[in-house]
């Protein structure tokens, strides 16, 4: 039976494909204050700005491609039962060929009703004021904004608890609740942490191996280590 490999990915893995992260620029995300474009208050104050911001991000997805980090995670499905929990809202894991992906913070290529959070639609074009659900309610980006609940969190916790191996790639482990997932891993299983500037995680009982590299290099090393240990 294949070992269950659960991977938590953050903005660092997509940064190599050209998608910028707000934490690299003092709270600015593509030149915008995150409070203006990633909070319910920002949406209420200026929905046109928020829609334009996510329309630009959505268009960008047509121009960027998965990098080696994404591609190798997909390849690992040949030998492992791989589940990816991602903080990213892009579709690069899907483009790379991974098949089990849980988006903690939503998806750029989906929108939802402002009145019914379970009314979710696939959406590839620009979203504008006047685009509504069947009941006439405005549609909004299907993004978990700061201050909102994380509906996928319980599923992510369950996946983490079931893991035989847990890996963290390209995240500062500073954004909660996602950063707390690692604490739910079985204390006996190995954890691999790939990041050029890894955070300190002294509170874990698990054997933790730090791979201080960007994802495209770190996942190559991870694949080699997993192959040597488990294949």
Image: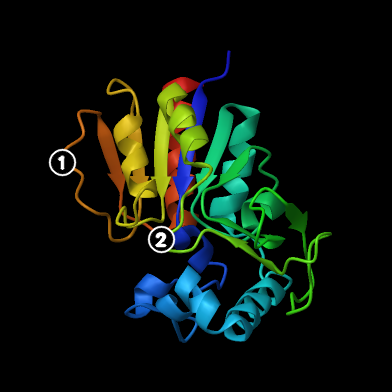
As drawn, which residue projects farthest toward the top? 1
Residue 19 placement (x, y as % from top left)? 54, 71
As drawn, which residue projects farthest toward the left? 202
Q: Nearer the viewer, residue 184 or 42?
A: 42
The quadrant where residue 160 appears = top left
Return the residue at label 2. 147
Per the model, the C-alpha gap separating discs 1 and 2 is 28 Å
Left or right: 18 in relation to 35 = right
What residue is at 32 percent from the left and 43 percent from the top?
180
As drawn, which residue projects farthest toward the right? 134
Q: Which mark is residue 55?
A: none
Residue 177 placement (x, y as % from top left)? 36, 48
- Give the vertical position of 60 relative to 73 (above or below): below
Return the residue at label 1. 202
Residue 119 placement (x, y as % from top left)? 72, 51
The quadrant where residue 226 appears = top left
Earlier in the chain: of badge 1 and badge 2, it is 2
Q: Which of 44 and 55 is in front in this view?
A: 44
The quadrant where residue 229 appears = top left
What residue is at 38 percent from the left and 55 percent from the top?
171
What residue is at 36 percent from the left and 39 percent from the top?
181
Q: How crowded is mark 2: few (under 14 residues within 10 Å), some or many (20 or more)?
A: few
What residue is at 59 percent from the left and 36 percent from the top?
76
Q: Nearer the viewer, mark 1 or mark 2?
A: 2
């Amino acid at each position: 039976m294949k070992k269950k490999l659960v991977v938590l990915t953050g903005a660092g893995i997509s940064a190599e494909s050209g998608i910028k992260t707000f934490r690299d620029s003092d709270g600015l995300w593509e030149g915008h204050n995150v409070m203006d474009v990633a909070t319910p208050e920002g949406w209420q104050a200026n929905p046109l700005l928020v829609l334009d911001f996510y329309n630009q991000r959505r268009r960008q997805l047509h121009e960027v491609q998965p990098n080696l980090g994404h591609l190798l995670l997909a390849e690992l499905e040949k030998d492992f039962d791989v589940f990816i929990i991602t903080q990213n809202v892009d579709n690069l894991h899907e483009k790379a060929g991974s098949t089990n992906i849980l988006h903690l913070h939503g998806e750029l290529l989906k929108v939802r009703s402002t009145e019914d959070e379970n009314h979710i639609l696939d959406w590839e074009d620009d979203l504008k004021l006047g685009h509504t659900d069947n009941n006439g309610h405005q549609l909004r980006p299907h993004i978990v904004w700061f201050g909102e609940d994380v509906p996928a969190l319980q599923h992510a916790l369950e996946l983490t608890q079931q893991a035989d191996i847990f890996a963290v790639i390209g995240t500062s482990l500073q954004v909660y609740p996602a950063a707390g997932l690692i604490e739910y891993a079985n204390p006996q299983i190995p954890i691999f942490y790939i990041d050029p500037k890894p955070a300190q995680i002294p509170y874990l009982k698990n054997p933790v191996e730090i791979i201080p590299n960007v994802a495209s290099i770190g996942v190559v090393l991870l694949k080699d280590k997993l192959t040597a240990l488990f294949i």
